[in-house]
Image (spheres, helix red, strand yellow):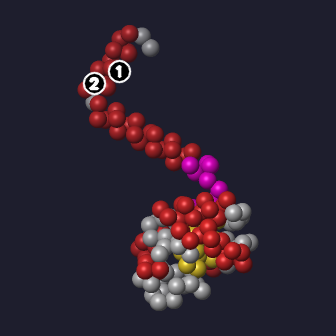
Amino acid sequence: MDGITLERLFEFVGNHLYLVIAFVVVTVLLIRDLVESLLRKYEVVTPLQAVLLINNEDAVVLDVREPHEWVKGHVADAVLISVGDLDKKLGELEPYRERPIIVTCQSGNRSITACGKLVAAGFPKVYLMKGGMTAWEEAGLPVVKSKQQSK
């Protein structure tokens, strides 16, 4: 770059500071997302992809919400283990070790933690349901409302 081009770049940055900051933030977020997707050991699926896994591969849904959230509506035949109890209740998932396990919570945030714990415990087929139960219900998929807390 010659001096004139560099001078024009500084002028552009000075005149469009918010635009440049927005560009840098978006670039950093995209790079972070790319790096995370390359490093994670679980797959992210949509609710409709989760239905296909349930129907075609006998996947199990692990709901990591709290019991008071569970009773408001959950996936039929899901297993409830809140994310806070997952470490001490991993043994309850042993019968499902070789089956795909789809992890869900309300919005998808707690599921990230649970997926990491399952992968660390050696579960080979772990899936995170993108958007959690909110996305499931928005997709018009059925929920079961009951007082039963787990199978």
Mark 1 secondary-structure assignment: helix
Amino acid on which disc 2 is placed? Gly
**Circle 1 residue:** 9
The residue singled out by tag 2 in the image is 14
Of the 4 image quadrants, the one containing the N terminus is: top left
Residue 40 on image: x %, y %: 61, 53
Picture quarter with the C terminus: bottom right
* Mark 1–mark 2 distance (CA, rounded to whole Å): 9 Å
Which residue appears at 45% of the width and 44% of the height?
29
Pointer 1 local density, CA inside 10 Å: few below 14, some 14–19, many at least 20: few
x and y percentages locating residue 58 in the rendered image: 67, 78
Q: Residue furthest top?
A: 3
Residue at far right of view: 98
Q: Nearer the viewer, mark 1 or mark 2?
A: 2
Camera-side residue: 1 or 148? 148
Q: Looking at the image, which is closer to me, 143 or 4?
A: 143
Residue 107, x across and y down, in percent? 44, 67
For this rendering, which residue is in front, 109 or 35?
Answer: 109
Instruction: Reply yes or no: does residue 9 show up in magenta.
Output: no
Q: Mark yes or no: residue 36 visible.
A: yes
The residue range painted magenta reads 36-45
Q: Is residue 43 magenta?
A: yes
28 vs 42, left or right, is: left
* Disc 1 residue type (three-letter): Leu
Q: Within 10 Å of the Cα at label 2, are there few (<14), some (14-19), or many (20+) other Cα atoms?
A: few
